[in-house]
Image (cartoon, rainbow, N blue to C red):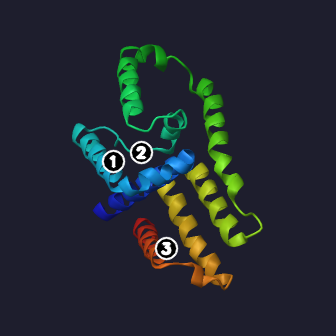
Amino acid sequence: MVLTLLFMEVFDGLAGFIALFTVMGRDADFCRPRLGRAFIADSLGVLAGAAAGVSPSTAYGESGAGVAAGGRTGLTAVCVATLFGLCLLLSAVFLAIPAAAIAPALVIVGLLMMKSMARLDFSDASEALPAFVIVAVVAFTMRLSDGLALGWILFIIMKLLAGRGSELNATVWAVGILFLGKEILTF
């Protein structure tokens, strides 16, 4: 059970950071060397959430809205946290809003998140099919870690079937084996 939770947190966090790097563009090169610090902050948020008995606080791709607006230093996160704190006072008002009213905003967020799909080489099935599987699994199961795991495993299989296994480095293999282990353990 502990390994399953570890895999979920590491790969959910990694997927969130990758999504944020996509939004950041060239600025991501500045942040990649500091990824270790981000994982520490993410881990502390998960621990704090567990200690408080609430959902874990972790990096989400949706944080890209703040990054896209220019947030880079953490002040954006502090501002959002403050506003969420103020929303607690108005929670009864927000709970009165039906879920159907929120759906159009979520559709727009999904549309904006698809922007990075335009950079895929759709003529190369070994690249496009794993990406499609990731999107489909996440969309239908709402489990980012499972989508990423299945897409990563399929990426390795597709490269091997295409006779392009030499394009896979040791890191890709290691993460693929970890993902395979995760999927076997959680199946």
| Of the image marks 2 and 3, the number of the one nearer the N terminus | 2
Give the camera-side residue of 186 and 36: 36
Question: How far apart in space, not on screen, are marks 2 and 1 (Cα)?
Answer: 6 Å
Q: Is residue 159 above or below residue 108?
A: below
In front: 61, or 87? 61
| Amino acid carrying mark 2 in the image | Ala
Q: Residue at coordinates 48% horizontally, 39% vertically from top-left?
A: 63
Query: Which residue has dot 1 on it?
Result: 42
Numbered tag placed on residue 166 in the rendering: none
Q: Give the residue type at disc 3.
A: Val
Of pointers 3 and 1, the one earlier in the residue sequence? 1
Q: Image quarter for residue 159? A: bottom right
Residue at 28%, 40% in the rendered image: 49
Q: Secondary structure at mark 3?
A: helix
Marks 3 and 1 sit apart, C-alpha to C-alpha, by 23 Å
Look at the numbered discs 2 and 1 and tell me whether their residues touch, using CB distance below 8 Å. Answer: yes
- Within the image, what quadrant is residue 167 found in? bottom right
Mark-to-mark CA distance, 2 and 3: 22 Å
* In the displayed structure image, the side of residue 69 where residue 10 appears, left or right: left
The amino acid marked with disc number 1 is Asp
Residue 1 location, x and y as percent? 30, 62
- Residue 148 in the image: state x and y as whole percent: 52, 60
Q: If the image is split into quadrants, where does the C terminus sit?
A: bottom left
Residue 172, label in figure? 3
Q: Is residue 81 above or below residue 179?
A: above
Instruction: Kindly state the secondary structure of the residue where label 1 is placed.
Output: helix
Examine the image and state in which quarter residue 74 appears: top left
Number of other residues with Cα within 10 Å of mark 2, as a class: few under 14, some 14 to 19, many 20 or more: many
Q: Residues within 10 Å of mark 1 (few under 14, many from 20)?
A: some
Q: Which residue is mark 2?
A: 59
Looking at the image, which residue is at 60% across and 71% down?
155
